[in-house]
Every structure is written in structure tokens, then in C-alpha cells.
């Protein structure tokens, strides 16, 4: 980086249907941004090239020379090898063994770090949003599945080489419904948007949810977060019951996490929570309180995420900055 110029930090969110690059200054004010759709099944080199090109466009929008980049952080879906910076599998993109870190470091000549996309989102909420400055933040993001993450004393909680906090695959009912992972009784089988929409479609088909049937019909693929929120607002009591029951399942799973980690803040995010924040925060909080030891009651706050789509991209950039700082401190100590 040329002497006398300010550095910048690049965050990238490689979601299932979209990619978003944002460039931030040292105070994490956005300088330039670019959003594109992802393309399932495109050749790996083409996909990696589109990631880098999206960053280039964000730099151009902010009139920023690439020499100012200090580090790049990428929030990635799927199982990851965090140390090597490789996406082992991204089913939504039909990719395997994607060398994100190596590719971006060669292209831009700057450090690149990857993190699980939910972990990055939780870190974003810890640094800038609903979990700001908490000692321990647990994030739960119900969507097509249910993602989880944790920031503990300023660091993303992770395994030796991979991410952890797979709360969606905590078993909440032995012998329960089949989950997409192949196990039975997982939280995702009860409280993901897919599970909720399936029950809602049945209710609409039976005539128990006339508002939902009017606005979305009975096709599972059309019953999304916005339609569920509109259904509740339109008086479909059974849909509200389905949603509160799902929140109760999340709260019971959360109780186990509270016993293990004693978080002071629990952040709920994702499209369902954005559409119905009060309902989910209430139902999750009440169920968690009912299922924790008395000494843990009223020790944690359940809050809706506040950063929306910016959580992952901000968190990825901030986590990359944290890791660069940690490396500098390590070398200085050595």
C-alpha cells in the first residue's frame, strides 16, 4: 500500500443466490459496493473470476485503487477448510474444493480469509449491530435450513479446521421427521422455513388459512417469509400458531446452548425473523426461559438482527481485519 494513503477492507458475501462485495474504510463506512446473482453450476474458474470481478467493480464504484486493500474477507456457505481457505462443498452453487483464499490472494496480492457465512453475519452483528460489544453472542438464522454461529470474547467460535455451531442439526425429537441431512428429529425438520411452509401449505389446502391461500396458494415454493407475515397480519390464526411452535422448538434448542455457553445476547436473523421479528423473539425467548435452569433465566437478551443483508459482508471484512491484526501482533511478539 503506498505510503500516505488510507487502507480499505473488502467484505464479500457469497450467498446461495447472490454475491455482494463492499469496500470499507478504516471506520467501516462503505466506499463502494456491487451485487450480482450467483450462477449455479458455472465452471469453477469462471465463478472465481466473477467473485474477483465483483470486487473490482466495487473498487471502481468507490474510486479506490486496489493497492489500498489491506485484506479481503469472504463469507462462504457449505463445509469449509478455514485454514486453507477452501470451500469443500457448496451445494447451492454445485461447487467442490474451491480455493477461494489462494485465488484472491494471487489476483489482488493481499491477504484473504474465509469464514462460514453465518459466522460472518454473527460477527457483523457483534461488531456493529444487535450484539455489539457483548461478551458472548449466539446467532440463530432460520431460513431454508437453520444456521448458527457464536462470537465468544471477540473471536468466532470454530473447530480446528472448520466452522461449528450447526444448531439446525441438534436433535430435538428422537425418531422425529427426516431431516435433509439424513438424520431424524433435527431442529431444521421442525423450524426451518421449509418445514414451516410445508405445514402452512397443508393448512391452506385444508381451508384453515384463507388469507395465505388467497395470496400464495398451496404451492410450497410460493409460501415464503413475506407471504407468511401477510397471512398472520390477515388473521390466519393457524399460521401464527405454526410459527410460534417453530419458535418454541428453536427456544428449546437454544436452552441447551445457554447451558453450555451462557451468552449475554442471542441474535435471531434471516428472512423469517426480518418478516416477523416480534413473534420470533417472543416465542424463542419464552421457550428458552422455560427450559433453562433457574440461575440462567433473565441472563440473556433475544434480539432481532439489525444489519440485514449487510451483516455477512461487514462481518467478513471486520473478521479479516481482526485476523490481520492478530498476525501483526504475533509477529511483533515473536
Image (cartoon, rainbow, N blue to C red):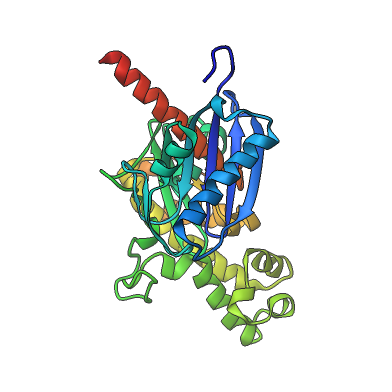
Residue drawn at 68 percent across, 81 percent down: 217
Examine the rendered structure and indicate whether residue 165 appears above or below residue 155: below
Q: Quadrant of residue 27?
A: top right
User: Which corner quadrant of the image does residue 147 belong to?
Assistant: bottom left
Is residue 39 visible in the rendered image? The answer is yes
Q: Position of residue 140 (x, y in %)?
A: 47, 52
Q: Residue furthest top?
A: 4
Farthest bottom residue in view: 206
Q: Position of residue 105 (x, y in %)?
A: 43, 37
Residue at (32% x, 43% y) in the render: 84
In the rendered structure, the answer to whether residue 161 lies left or right of residue 153 reads: left
Q: Nearer the viewer, residue 8 or 181?
A: 8
- Report whether 302 appears left or right of 103: right
For the residue pair 292 and 240, the one nearer the viewer reads as 240
Instruction: Give the side of residue 23 with respect to residue 148, left or right.
Output: right
Q: Position of residue 225 (x, y in %)?
A: 63, 64
227 or 11, which lies in front? 11
Report the number of discs.
0
Q: Residue at x 44, y 63 (%)?
A: 249
Q: Does residue 102 appear to the left or right of 16 in the view shown?
A: left
Q: Is residue 25 above or below residue 164?
A: above
Residue located 35% across and 41% down the image: 157
Q: Nearer the viewer, residue 170 or 50?
A: 50
Quadrant where the C terminus sits is: top left
Quick check: can you spot residue 266? no
Amino acid at each position: 500500500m503506498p505510503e500516505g494513503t488510507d487502507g480499505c477492507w473488502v467484505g464479500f458475501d457469497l450467498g446461495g443466490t447472490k454475491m455482494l462485495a463492499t469496500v470499507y474504510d478504516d471506520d467501516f463506512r462503505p466506499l463502494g459496493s456491487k451485487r450480482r446473482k450467483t450462477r449455479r453450476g458455472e465452471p469453477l474458474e469462471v465463478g472465481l473470476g466473477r467473485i474477483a470481478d465483483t470486487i473490482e467493480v466495487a473498487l471502481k464504484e468507490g474510486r479506490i485503487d486496489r493497492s489500498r486493500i489491506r485484506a479481503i474477507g469472504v463469507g462462504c456457505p457449505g463445509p469449509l477448510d478455514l485454514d486453507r481457505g477452501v470451500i469443500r462443498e457448496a451445494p447451492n452453487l454445485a461447487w467442490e474444493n474451491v480455493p477461494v483464499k489462494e485465488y484472491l490472494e494471487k489476483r489482488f496480492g493481499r491477504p484473504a480469509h474465509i469464514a462460514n457465512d453465518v459466522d460472518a453475519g454473527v460477527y457483523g452483528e457483534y461488531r456493529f449491530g444487535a450484539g455489539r460489544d457483548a461478551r458472548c453472542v449466539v446467532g440463530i438464522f432460520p431460513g431454508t435450513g437453520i444456521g448458527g454461529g457464536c462470537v465468544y470474547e471477540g473471536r468466532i467460535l470454530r473447530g480446528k479446521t472448520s466452522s461449528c455451531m450447526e444448531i439446525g442439526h441438534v436433535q430435538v425429537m428422537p425418531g422425529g421427521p427426516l431431516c435433509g441431512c439424513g438424520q431424524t428429529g433435527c431442529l431444521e425438520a421442525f423450524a426451518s422455513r421449509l418445514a414451516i411452509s410445508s405445514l402452512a401449505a397443508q393448512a391452506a389446502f385444508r381451508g384453515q388459512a384463507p388469507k395465505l391461500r388467497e395470496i400464495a396458494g398451496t404451492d410450497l415454493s410460493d409460501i415464503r417469509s413475506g407471504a407468511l407475515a401477510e397471512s398472520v397480519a390477515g388473521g390466519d390464526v393457524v399460521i401464527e400458531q405454526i410459527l410460534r411452535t417453530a419458535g418454541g422448538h428453536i427456544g428449546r434448542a437454544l436452552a441447551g446452548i445457554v447451558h453450555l455457553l451462557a451468552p449475554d445476547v442471542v441474535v435471531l436473523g434471516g428472512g423469517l425473523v426480518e418478516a416477523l421479528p416480534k413473534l420470533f423473539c417472543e416465542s424463542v425467548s419464552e421457550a428458552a426461559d422455560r427450559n433453562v435452569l433457574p440461575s440462567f433465566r433473565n441472563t440473556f437478551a433475544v434480539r432481532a438482527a439489525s444489519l440485514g443483508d449487510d451483516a455477512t459482508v461487514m462481518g467478513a471484512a471486520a473478521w479479516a481485519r481482526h485476523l490481520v491484526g492478530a498476525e501483526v501482533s504475533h509477529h511483533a511478539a515473536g
